[in-house]
Image (tube, grey):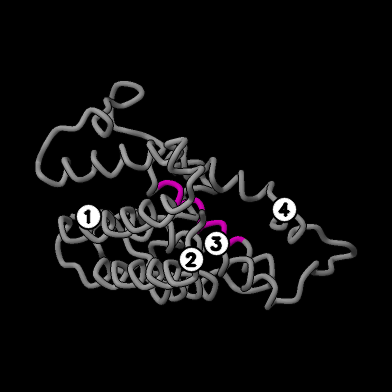
Amino acid sequence: MRASEGQYRHLKAALGDMAMKYDAAETEIARLEAILGQLRALILYHQNDREIADKFILRPLGALEAALYDCGRGAKVPLLDHAPERPGRPVRLAREDVQGSLAFAVELLVAGRRGTEAACEWVATTARRQGLRSEDGAPLTARQVKSWRAEISRGKAPAGACETFVHLRCMRPYSAAFRTASGQQPLPQQGYEVLAGAIIKGLAATAPRSGPKKANRS
């Protein structure tokens, strides 16, 4: 037996309520509680599918929910407690993916004949409108985005950021946006904005508070 239309409407309402609580939260524990609320709503909704319930298909999500709950109570949870892959600081974190992705969004706009300064401002403004923020909750700025792209171009950015940039550059439909014939743009300028906007929207949904923090300058 699958979930009814009424149960689906209830799920959407619950997800929307938790999304508003997440956006309005002023503490990390409040954000975590909103995350747990969404996770529980999704688990309960899909448990209405008898095959999913009988085969315990959502057991991994249940384990994650329990681990996040315990972690929010101050417990050291083995599922979420891992040493770095190698000695030193952790690498290939979510912030590196955000850095590489937003730098690539600028690259797309520049390929569409938009100036670098204007492209960085467009990306930063769109990110702020979509709710994409840095790890400390600060809004992203055009200066940050410009510096991330410059770091990648010089090979000075974290490995994860560079890998994300190169990976996107090779993906369809992005790769086709750079192919030119007789100096012609493959897409109208609006097409580049659509592609760049889709990248930002995806980040705002999957990594809403994962942008690198502003560097401290003395």
For residue 104, which quarter of the picture? bottom right
Residue topped by disc 4: 172
Q: Residues within 10 Å of mark 3 (few under 14, many from 20)?
A: some
Residue 138 percent across, percent down from the top left: 26, 66
Segment colored magenta: 96-107
- Element carrying mark 2: loop
Residue 5 percent across, percent down from the top left: 49, 70
Query: Which label number is shown at residue 4?
Result: 2
Distance from disc 1 to disc 2, alpha carbons, whole Å, reads 29 Å
Q: Looking at the picture, which amino acid does disc 1 mark?
A: Leu
Magenta part mainly helix, strand or loop? helix
User: Disc 3 vs disc 2: which is toward the camera?
Assistant: 2
Query: Which label number is shown at residue 32?
Result: 1
Q: Looking at the picture, which amino acid does disc 4 mark?
A: Arg
Q: Are marks 1 and 3 in contact (CB under 8 Å)?
A: no
Distance from disc 3 to disc 4, alpha carbons, whole Å, reads 13 Å
Residue topped by disc 3: 199
The residue that appears at 15% across and 55% down in the rendered structure is 29
In the figure, 134 relative to 56: above or below? Answer: below
User: Disc 2 vs disc 4: which is toward the camera?
Assistant: 2
Q: Residues within 10 Å of mark 2 (few under 14, many from 20)?
A: few
User: Disc 1 vs disc 2: which is toward the camera?
Assistant: 2
Magenta-colored stretch includes residue 105: yes
Q: Are marks 2 and 4 in contact (CB under 8 Å)?
A: no
